[in-house]
Amino acid sequence: MSKRNLLALYGNFEEAELVVKELRAASISGFNAGDDMVVKSPIEHPEVEEFLGDKPVYVQWFTLVGAVMGGLLGFFLISGGQANFYMQLKGGKPIVPFPPNFILTYEMFILGGVFITILGFLVCAGLPAKRSSLYSRKVSEDNIAILVEVEEAAVSAIRAIFVKHKALEIQEEAGK
Amino acid sequence: MKDIREDIAWVKINQDVMKSLENPRKLYWVILFCAICAFGVGVSCEIYQYRTGMGVANLNNPQVWGLYIATFIFWIGMSHSGTLLSAILHLMHADWRKPIYRFAEAMTTFSLMTAGLFVLVHIGRLWQFYYSLPYPNERGIWPNFQSPLLWDAMAIFTYLSSSILFLFVGMIPDLAIARDNMADGWRRKLYTLLALGWEGTDRQWRNFRVTYLTIACFLIPLAVSVHSIVASDFAMSQAPGWHVTSFPPYFVAGALYSGCAAIITLFIILRYTFRFEEYMTKSILKKIVRLTFAIAMVWTYLNAVEFAAVWYSHDEASKAVLIQKATGTYAPFWWGMIFCGSVVPLVFAFERFQTNIPVLFATSLLLNLGMWLERWMIIAPTFSHGLYPWTWDHDQWPSMVQWGMVFGSFGWFTLLFMIFCKVFPSVSMYEVKEMVYHRTLHLKKSEAAEQGAH
């Protein structure tokens, strides 16, 4: 069955929260509130997460892997370089000295952590992305947008909920 | 006095900041012109030095570092302001930082880029720079991994690349706002490209928050490591005046100090030039001034610790350098450093000066003069009065080429910074909105509680 996208704009978080709650409570066939709903907001808003419910964030795993890999890579590259240069007279000092290598390892630990965290952010946030079919620049000003993807049969029910809560604007477009 | 008005409309925040990208006051162009001229002087000096040889810099034995490395440390120090405002105050939930942290982050990036230039300038043989890079080569040699100079290069590279990424990631939501509000043209194309398709979805914000916090956590130890490694360039040597245990914290405090002073200077310039009076308020300025005063006192204390440690250590060579600093050729500059770094900030202790813009502007410039003198006074006196009397050279004076390059570095930094502020939003729009939103909520709650009490 073909799907449609609907986007409703609201002027405040309280109203948007009520809409989300009602969409969740209403059992509309052809609409899954968990997967088919996206809330767009102009600021990082903890309340959005509260009313949408906890969703996992995996960026920290990228951070962990990046930092560990960066540290290991740094240590072994440096130690490899030192071991490769063994003919240099060290005056009784070790060929691979740990204290100075620790400092470079530390820097590479951070470098790897930061770079891979950014990569993780891009992967987890789905960026870079094409702009979605329904978008209003008012979201970057002060409006909250609720974007839903529903089967055609459910469009009128969803639209009724949006209208009931006095949406400032409703956009509709044919989806997949 | 409020940090920001609670009734300011979000649309207006967008409009005001977007206007700053197009229509600054005339002073902007005057500053830009002066910066280009100063940078031109620096470039001319570098070309002259490159073509003629390092001799024109008047660097010799024992004065091998001169103003180049002193100014390098100064610019590295300046970079700590961004980390302080973005990362440390972010973790402490100090929301007054929100309207001003973006330009402090830009300061970090550009001051690191300026510092990097001095390493190249000081090398002299620019075409052999790649010798210092660690890569397998047919010469069969590697840089010395035990040397703090190599740690320094690694730390600065890490700090620069991380700062650029931190600045960029924090700017993505604002770039999306700029993309949505800008008329067609090169700017819109640029913002569209850099915004990466950001739409402010819950998924994007969720991951954004964690990423920003994580990088902030990485940046704090990184910033401390960068300047303590720079301190190690000195403290790990046996030279009198440098072989001091307290050097790393002393350097870090000095870095935060000069960074904060520079924030005050640029705050005042941006506030006027881009008409940011509503966002860069006097209340926020007052907070930075108080922070700077506290750091100034920490710096003064660490200075006293260093002098006392040298004085009571019975290390005659170090003591001789300290006496030479206070009474020898460099005495006017050394006492100038003490005056600018420890006496001038006492102005900040008086409440009536904490929001007096002309006084603060002049004071912040004097503080940074003091901090630049500090770096010079770390380097020159030790070289001029080392362990061996036959190497003493108290009368060495940097050549005009060195002074020209130092002057040019200020032009280069200002040029980059002013271009950045004209091309990218120098006030974080989404964070100012957050600040307004949370303060409005707080106000509503207080009013409701008050009504309930009645």
Image (cartoon, rainbow, N blue to C red):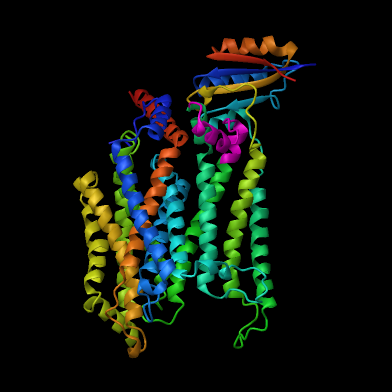
Residue B15 coordinates in the image, percent (x, y):
41, 27
Q: Quadrant of the C terminus of chain B?
A: top left
Q: What's drawn in magenta, residue-wise?
A: B183-208
Give the vertical position of B378 relative to A156 (above or below).
below
Residue B287, position in %: x, y? Answer: 32, 46
Q: Is residue B234 left or right of residue A85?
A: left
Any magenta on residue B200?
Answer: yes
Within the image, what quadrant is residue A47 found in?
A: top right
Residue in the foreground of this view, choosing between A130 and B284: A130
Tell me, yes or no, if residue B427 can be seen here: no
> Residue at point 46% right, 52% down?
B109
Instruction: Name the residue: 37% across, 27% down.
Output: B8
Looking at the rendered structure, the number of numbered marks drawn on it comes to 0
The answer to whether B100 is drawn above or below residue B298 in the figure is above
Q: Quadrant of residue B320?
A: bottom left
Q: Residue at x 35, y 23 (%)?
A: B451
Q: Is B322 or B188 nearer to us in this picture?
A: B188
Q: Quadrant of the N terminus of chain B?
A: top left
Asked if residue B345 is positioned above or below residue B32 in the image, the reply reads: below
Residue B101 point in image, percent of width and height: 42, 44
